[in-house]
Image (cartoon, rainbow, N blue to C red):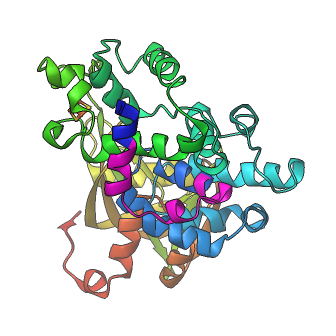
Amino acid sequence: MGWDQHLLTWFNAHQREMPWRSNPLPYWVWVSEIMLQQTQVATVIPYFNRFIAQFPTVEILAAANQQTVLKAWEGLGYYSRARNLHKAAQIVCNDHQGQLPDTYEGLQKIPGIGPYVGAAIASIAFSQPVPVVDGNVLRVFSRFWGIETDITKPQARVVIFSRLSPVIQAKTASNFNQAIMELGALICTPKSPNCTQCPLSFECIAFQTNRTTELPVKAKKAATPHYDIAVAVIWKDGKILIGKRKPDQLLGGMWEFPGGKQKPNESLAQTAEREATEETGLEIRVKDGFITVNHAYTHFKITLTAFNCEYFAGLASNKTTDEVRWVDPEELNDYPFPKANKKVVEAILAPKILAQTPLFEV
Ligand code: SF4
C-alpha cells in the first residue's frame, strides 16, 4: 500500500465532523473555504452554521444588503472576505445562473477564488483531481519529501503542486485533499509534529533523518509593529456618534468610533480629542477612559483605549468616513463593528460598566 492509501485510511478513521463535510454542496464548500482562510475550524463552525441558516442559497446571499452580510461576519475578521464573497455571489447569479463553475480553471474566473479555494471547491464539490496547496500542505510535504525551498516563496507551491498532481485521483480527490489538510492540522503541526501517530512516518524524510524541527524552511517575518490607539465615544443627548469606514479602507463597510494613532508627546486623551475633531469636525470634551483592548491584525497590533467624551459644539461630518450617525446605545448592536470596537460596544452596553468608576480620569 502506498503512502496515499495510508493517508486515506487514516483520514477515514480520524476526520473531524464538519457541517460542510457531511454535505459538500459547492456553495457550502465555497463559504467554508473563504471562512477557513486565516481562521481555525473550531471558530468557523458556528459562524458557518449561522451564515448558511441566514443565507441558505447563493441567490439569497447575492440579494442581501452588504451591511447584513458584514453583520453576519462580525467577529470573524478579514472583512474583505465577506465583501468579496458577497460581490462574487452576485456575479455567480448574474453571469452563471446561480451555479459555480465545476472546473478548477472556471472557478478561478470568479473574483475572490484563487488557486487554493479553486482547488478546494473543484476537488471537494466536483471530484476534480486538483491538489490543494495551503500552509498545512506546504508544511506536511516539505517534511515528507525533505523539500528545502522556503515555503513563503511562490516556488514552494509550484514544486509541491507539481509533485502532488500525478498522485491525486478523481475518485478520491476530495478525501485526499482534506486528509492532507487534516493531517497538517492534527498531526503534522508546526511546532511539535506527532510523528509516532502519523500514517506517513514510514516514508517521511524529515522524520527518518530527524529534521522535523528544521523543515519546512520559512523566512522569519519582520517584527510586528504596535500602535496605541485612542477612540472617542462622543455622547450627545443620550446618543453616540459612529462612522462607517470607506469601502476601499481596511475594514471597509464596518462601523467604528472616531479615533486613531497616538502621536509622540501626546496623551491618549489628547489623541482621542484630536482624532475626533479631525474626523468629524466636532468640538468635544474628553471625560474618562473606560476600557482598554489589545488586538492583533495580520501586520500590526494595537492597544485601543476608549474614552467617554462630551459633545461641545459643531455639526458631525463624514470627513474621513463614508457616513456618520448618531445612534442610541441600544442600536449599536444593529451595526457591524470590527473586534476591538465591538469590545467597546459591549463595555458601553454592560450596565455595570456604564455605572462603574472610570478606568482612569482625564
Ligand atoms: S512523520 Fe512527522 S514530520 Fe513526517 S509528515 Fe508525519 S507528522 Fe509530519
Is 58 or 219 nearer to us in this picture?
A: 58
How many labels were placed on the picture?
0
Is 38 or 335 nearer to us in this picture?
A: 38
Answer above or below: position of 104 versus 230.
above
Residue 11 colored in magenta in the image:
yes
Residue 262 colored in magenta in the image:
no
| Figure quadrant of the N terminus | top left
| Figure quadrant of the C terminus | bottom left
Q: Specify whether 269 is left or right of 345.
A: left
Query: Bounds of the magenta span?
Result: 8-29
Q: Quadrant of residue 316?
A: bottom right
| Quarter of the displayed picture in which ligand 1 can be seen | top left
Q: Position of residue 74 (x, y in %)?
A: 50, 63
Q: Answer whether residue 262 is visible to the viewer in this image.
A: no
Q: Kindly identify the residue that appears in the image at 40 percent across and 34 percent down.
A: 4
Answer above or below: position of 360 versus 1.
below
Q: Position of residue 181 (x, y in %)?
A: 40, 42
Is 143 or 347 nearer to us in this picture?
A: 143
Q: Kindly identify the residue that appears in the image at 58 percent across and 48 percent down.
A: 124
Q: Position of residue 216 (x, y in %)?
A: 27, 22
Answer above or below: position of 306 versus 106.
below
Dominant secondary structure, magenta? helix
Q: Kindly identify the residue that appears in the image at 73 percent across and 38 percent down.
A: 103
Q: Answer whether residue 258 is visible to the viewer in this image.
A: yes
Answer above or below: position of 1 versus 230.
above
Q: Kindly identify the residue that appears in the image at 56 percent across and 76 percent down.
A: 334
Q: Specify whether 16 is left or right of 174.
A: left
Q: Position of residue 122 (x, y in %)?
A: 64, 42
